[in-house]
């Protein structure tokens, strides 16, 4: 690596990427990238670091949506009072990332673009229906977060040409609840064996009108248990319903055996247990 550059704004960052034409790599936080460089999995000539760009470092809530600057760190999101109040699942997910030192450096954009299927902030953002702004020299476009992961370690965002600048999440006007659950071998610095995030929205009659149930790592990308979601719609929350939906999610999940995380059969059971716990917690928010 020959250069580590720090542009002052998004426009300057794009100019640098254009100037180096594929030899430069955009970074934000770089907690994963530095390991990959050390292991020679990637060998960029230039790093364009957007971690401190003011345009990418904010949290706002207005016009029915929460907008997160993509260079916000996990520690900042976990501590943000608006995030805690409106989307506790996201606050809890960010609080689970790595160690305090990593949370103070690792950014939302970095977690998304590194495309690790068990990323503790990406799972709740997927459950919340997050949409990302991606900017290139051709302009800006919005794309659902759930569409950005291609496979393990590879996203559809090209860090030699594109910048993920912000994440938008709709704030529901009615009753809703969110929850994040995680099991790992120890409290910190451990990859999750399974993590789960859910979002439930309630209709005026108390039935569930919308649901997202996301689990990982049970596939190469964060996995939505769509049959479990469908089972919840139109029904009133109950322990029996949540147990049924959790069993459906278990049946849908297909985790592989892993020396690090345990057998696939073991993790399928964990999916069931965590989904049931998360649904119960989310529903309690609008009970």
Image: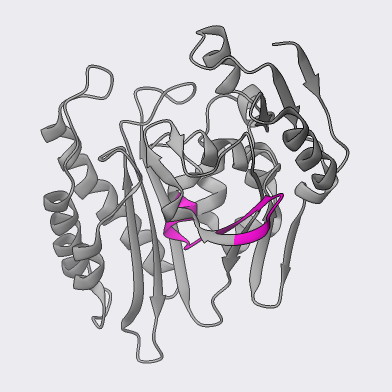
Question: Where residue 138 appears, x then y in whole percent?
Answer: 68, 54
Q: Which quadrant of the rendered structure holds the N terminus? A: top right
Nearer-the-camera pick, 94 or 205: 94
Question: Where residue 164 appears, x then y in whole percent?
Answer: 64, 47
Q: Is residue 107 magenta?
A: no
Side (left or right) of 112 relative to 59: left
Q: On the image, which quarter does residue 178 sit in?
A: bottom left
Q: On the image, which quarter does residue 284 sit in?
A: bottom left
Q: Is residue 131 magenta?
A: yes
**Residue in view at x 18 percent, y 47 percent:** 253
Q: Which quadrant of the rendered structure holds the C terminus? A: bottom left
Side (left or right) of 159 relative to 6: left
Q: Residue furthest right?
A: 8
Evaluate whether residue 78 shows in this view.
Answer: yes
Nearer-the-camera pick, 166 or 209: 166
Q: On the image, which quarter does residue 259 sit in?
A: top left
Q: Is residue 287 above or below residue 148?
A: below
Evaluate whether residue 50 shows in this view.
Answer: no
**Magenta stretch, residue numbers:** 124-141
**Residue in view at x 24 percent, y 63 percent:** 226
Question: Where residue 119 appears, x then y in whole percent?
Answer: 45, 37
Question: Where residue 34 appears, x then y in whole percent?
Answer: 60, 16
Nearer-the-camera pick, 166 or 94: 166
Side (left or right) of 258 relative to 200: left
């Amino acid at each position: 690596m020959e250069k580590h550059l720090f542009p002052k704004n998004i426009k300057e960052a794009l100019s640098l990427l254009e100037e180096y034409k594929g030899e430069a790599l955009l970074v934000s936080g770089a907690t994963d990238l530095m390991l990959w460089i050390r292991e020679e999995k990637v060998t960029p000539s230039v790093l364009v670091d957007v971690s401190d760009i003011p345009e990418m470092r904010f949290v706002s809530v207005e016009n029915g949506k929460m907008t997160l600057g993509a260079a916000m760190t996990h520690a900042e999101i976990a501590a943000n009072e608006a995030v805690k109040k409106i989307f506790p699942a996201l606050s809890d997910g960010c609080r689970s990332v790595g160690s305090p030192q990593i949370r103070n450096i690792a950014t939302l954009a970095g977690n998304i673009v590194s495309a690790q299927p068990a990323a503790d902030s990406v799972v709740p953002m997927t459950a919340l229906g997050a949409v990302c702004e991606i900017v290139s020299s051709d302009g800006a476009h919005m794309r659902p977060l759930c569409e950005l992961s291609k496979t393990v370690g590879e996203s559809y965002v090209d860090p030699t040409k594109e910048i993920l600048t912000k994440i938008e999440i709709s704030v529901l006007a009615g009753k809703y609840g969110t929850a994040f659950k995680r099991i790992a071998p120890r409290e910190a610095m451990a990859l999750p064996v399974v993590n789960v995030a859910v979002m439930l929205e309630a209709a005026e009659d108390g039935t569930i009108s919308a649901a997202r149930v996301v689990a990982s790592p049970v596939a190469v990308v964060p996995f939505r248990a769509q049959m479990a979601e469908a089972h919840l719609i139109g029904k009133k929350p109950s322990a029996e319903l949540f147990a049924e939906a959790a069993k459906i999610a278990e049946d849908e999940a297909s985790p592989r055996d892993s020396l690090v995380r345990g057998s696939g059969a073991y993790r399928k059971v964990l999916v069931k247990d965590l989904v049931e716990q998360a649904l119960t917690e989310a529903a309690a928010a609008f009970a």
